Amino acid sequence: MFVHAVPDNRGKKDGFYCSLVESHRINGVPMHSIKISFGFVPSKRLPYLKAAFNNGNPAEILEQAIRSLEKSTSNEPNSSDKQSHGRKSKA
């Protein structure tokens, strides 16, 4: 079982819609069965949810999830990185 997180891309919400999912095969085709639906989860809380329900060591899963979350937020362009689109600023 694992936590399936779908990003919320409606509006400016910063989070995911999460559910606890079990994987299995039916006639050789991979299928997922939803066991629990958690609803909307803020992105800052997602690593804790994954650490609680995924297989493995919760501390390692939490560290890995936090590192990946930090990477994704550090890769976003800053407002100072935007181009002027050929316009000259008035000085």
Image (cartoon, helix red, strand yellow):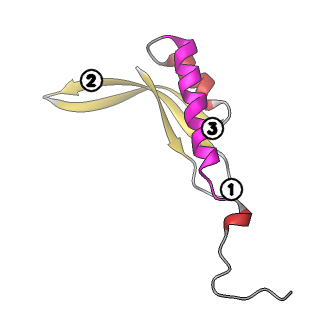
Under circle 3, the secondary element is: helix
Q: Are marks 3 and 1 in contact (CB under 8 Å)?
A: no
Which residue is more in the foreground, 2 or 88?
Answer: 88
Q: Badge 2 local density, few (<14 within 10 Å), some, or many (20+)?
A: few
Q: Amino acid at mark 2?
A: His
> Among all residues in the image, which is located at the extreme top?
57
User: Which residue appears at 58% of the width and 31% of the height?
Assistant: 67
Q: Quadrant of the N terminus?
A: top left
Task: Tell me if 22 is positioned left or right of 80 in this view.
Answer: left
Q: Are marks 2 and 1 in contact (CB under 8 Å)?
A: no
Q: Which residues make up the magenta segment?
A: 57-77
Instruction: Name the residue that disc number 3 marks.
Output: 70
Instruction: Name the residue that disc number 2 marks.
Output: 24
Disc nearer the start of the sequence (3/2) = 2
- The spot of residue 84 in percent (x, y) is 68, 80
- What secondary structure characterizes most of the magenta part? helix
Residue 17 position (above or below residue 80): above
- The spot of residue 48 in percent (x, y) is 62, 23
Residue 20 position (above or below residue 10): above
Task: Tell me if 9 is positioned left or right of 23 in this view.
Answer: right
The CA span between labels 2 and 1 is 35 Å
Task: Tell me if 42 is positioned left or right of 34 in this view.
Answer: right
Q: Amino acid at mark 1?
A: Lys
